[in-house]
Amino acid sequence: MSRLSGLAKKDAGLYEKTINLPFITMEEKFEKTLQELELSQFVSIEAKSCIKKKVEYKNKWAKCIIKYNFTAGISTTSRVESLHSKLRNHLNSNSSLMELFQAFREIEKQVLIILRKNMKGTQGI
């Protein structure tokens, strides 16, 4: 949601709602927040377009939608777990600060490659 970082300064309340959008458990509140974003003068056209694309897949990330799917109580923090795994692969208790920065730089490169591939795949949407 980095496209919305300017919103934090202009409308902190709406920014907070936006950050918590995936965790809203009531569909009515979810839809109301989306409507607030759409009507806000502080959200750029580019950000609104990005949000619309993400909402097309809300059945994969919005708690108010996926709560109706059987998950056996399992939820994921895969992005964070993935980052921790990559850090563990690069670092250990004897690693220097320089090695930490190099590990972050390597992970950043890998993430950028993945994001670019994903963006190429969504350009036809």
Image: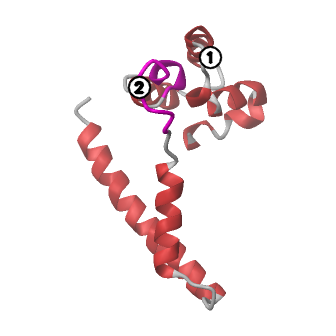
Most frequent secondary structure within the magenta stretch: loop
Q: In this view, does 53 lie to the left or right of 37?
A: left
Q: Is residue 109 above or below residue 38?
A: below
State which quadrant residue 10 falls in.
Answer: top right
- Residue at 52% over, 47% down: 77
Residue at mark 2 to residue at mark 1: CA–CA distance: 25 Å
Q: Residue 33 carries which label?
A: 1
Give the amino acid type for the residue marked by disc 1 in the picture.
Answer: Thr
Quadrant where the image shows the C terminus: top left
- Residue at 59% over, 8% down: 28
Q: Which mark is residue 2?
A: none
State which quadrant residue 96 falls in.
Answer: bottom right
Residue placed most toward the observer, 61 or 11: 61
| Residue extent of the magenta highlight | 62-74
Q: In this view, does 27 lie above or below 118?
A: above
Coordinates of residue 53 in the picture (x, y in percent): 39, 27
**Residue that extends furthest to the top in the rendered view of this protein:** 28
Quadrant where the image shows the N terminus: top right
Q: In this view, does 36 lie above or below 23?
A: above
Front disc: 2 or 1? 2
Residue 26 part of the magenta segment: no
Q: Residue 70 carries which label?
A: 2
Q: How crowded is mark 2: few (under 14 residues within 10 Å), some or many (20 or more)?
A: few
The total of numbered circles placed on residues is 2
- Residue at 28% over, 52% down: 117
